[in-house]
Amino acid sequence: MNVAFLPDAAEDPFAPEHSHAYLRWRERKLARYPRRAEDLIVEVRDPRKLSDSEAEELRRVCGMANMAVYACPLAGVADKNIAGCLGLQLGLGRLHANPLADEDGVSSLEVTPGKSGLGYIPYSNQRLRWHTDGYYNAPQQRIGAFILHCVRPAATGGANRLLDHEIAYLLLRDADPEYVKALSAPDAMTIPANTEQGTVIRPAQSGPVFSTDAGTLHMRYTARTRSVEWQSGETTRAAVAFLNGILDADSPAGSRYVFSLRLAGGQGLVCNNVLHDRTAFSDYRASGPGRLVYRARYSGRINGARPE
């Protein structure tokens, strides 16, 4: 029997004082964590109309790694309903739109000079550094989950690396519990205000890197250096340096827990806002349009089914 896993609040494994609950959670987490990116892939016939078994399998894989990758025979099909319908079937509910999203709340991520020229990297072919979505949002607007659906991959490049934020927390806590305490401080990370021609588009936003809600862990993080201000304490600086080391492609932890993949047409990522990046890409082809990925963001989470 599969059930949604939500730890009891009194046994919150992410509470610093609950060391025994943490160790039990850690043992389960590592025992079930996928070994390869291929272990994340779930074959589905049509993500707009999942079968019960397909939906259950996506939740099961998400329950292990906070992410799953689906593959379907819809390569090249530019249907905005794919991401939205899939989210509803996974219990994600209402889309969390941002100002640059399309009218239906789903973002069409493709090279768009009008947006990339203003510094919005997802709409360019430049690399995206490690981050979680919505790291610049206020706490009440945080992103709990998102879906990426690839309509067309780039001619070259555009690959992602992915790391479960719970694994990042685990590695930091194992290294030094003071690291996660420092990164849970309410002023651990500040994103400066976004201004255009003297107008404040978004005010400065301070908040923790790690926070919890009903026994679930949320992370806000960006590896960018010019758009982030870290709390000045020595422990915070050491924690950020350790986290950056985990995300380094050559680190032992990175080689063990970081998944690398390049979404093909008809493939998509469903996740509870895990850490991710994207390599630069080229759309140069003899003919045909360039890379197109739909992104749907949600406030809620995918409740992954885990074995009893």
Image: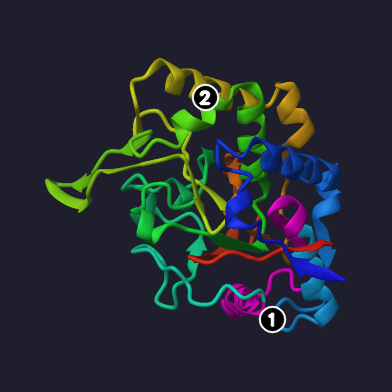
Helix, strand or loop at mark 2: helix
Membership of 78 in magenta stretch: yes
The boundaries of the magenta stretch are 62-89
Nearest the viewer among 166 and 104 is: 166
Identify the residue at image location x=44%, y=45%. 121
Q: Does the rendering let one see residue 293?
A: no
Quadrant for the N terminus in the image: bottom right
Helix, strand or loop at mark 1: loop
Q: Measuring from the top left, give residue 109's x and y in whole percent.
A: 51, 59
Q: In which quarter of the image is residue 63?
A: bottom right
Q: Measuring from the top left, give residue 41's x and y in whole percent.
A: 82, 58
Q: Does the rendering let one see residue 82?
A: yes
Nearest the viewer among 116 and 80 is: 80
Q: In the displayed structure, would residue 100 be above or below residue 80?
A: above
Looking at numbered disc 1 in the image, what kind of residue is underneath it?
A: Arg
Q: In the displayed structure, would residue 21 be above or below residue 134?
A: above
Quadrant for the C terminus in the image: bottom right
Q: Residue furthest left?
A: 198
| Mark number, residue 178 | 2
Q: Which of marks 2 and 1 is nearer the N terminus?
A: 1
Membership of 173 in magenta stretch: no
Identify the residue at image location x=46%, y=39%. 209
Q: Measuring from the top left, give residue 244's x and y in whole percent.
A: 56, 25
